Image (spheres, helix red, strand yellow):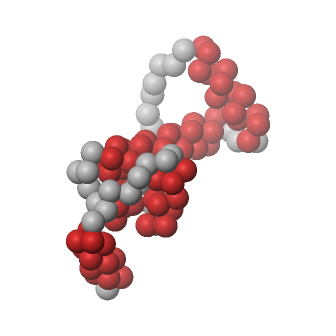
Amino acid sequence: MSKNIAARIPKELEKEIDDYMKDKGLDKSAAIRKILETGIFNWKIEKALTLYKLKRVSLWKASHIANLSLREMMDELNNRKIPLNISSQDIIDDIKAAQQAEL
């Protein structure tokens, strides 16, 4: 279900949205939805990476927070030069969680 949302934005941002619309061939509503989706997607990745770096979540949990596969999450870590903070117990727990998720 869709919901209308109103927001006041600076003229500079409106121009950026207009440029995006023209570049992507979208109407204003579709352009704003796409920008929001992209922003939320990136925010989830940043949140997951931060929690992972702080050792508050496992690699598996971080991948779920970011809505990425385990492989994609590992690629994100590699691309950002974030070391794996993983123990053998973490690997065992992640395998068990993955198996349970497949059921």
Seen as rendered, the residue at the extreme bottom is 103
Along the horizontal axis of the image, is 70 left or right of 101?
right
Q: Position of residue 52 (x, y in %)?
A: 32, 51
Report the residue at 31% width, 62% height from top.
86
Question: Dividing the picture into quarters, in which one does residue 87 lie?
Answer: bottom left
Could you tell me if residue 61 is visible in this image? no
Report the residue at 47% width, 60% height from top.
74
Report the residue at 38% width, 48% height from top.
49
Question: Dividing the picture into quarters, in which one does residue 21 lie?
Answer: top right
The count of marks equals 0
Is 88 in front, or is 19? Answer: 88
Residue 84, relative to residue 6: is it above or below? below
Q: Position of residue 56 (x, y in %)?
A: 23, 51
Is 62 in front, or is 82? Answer: 82
Residue 57, relative to residue 27: is it above or below? below
In the rendered image, the quadrant that contains the C terminus is: bottom left
Could you tell me if residue 77 is visible in this image? yes
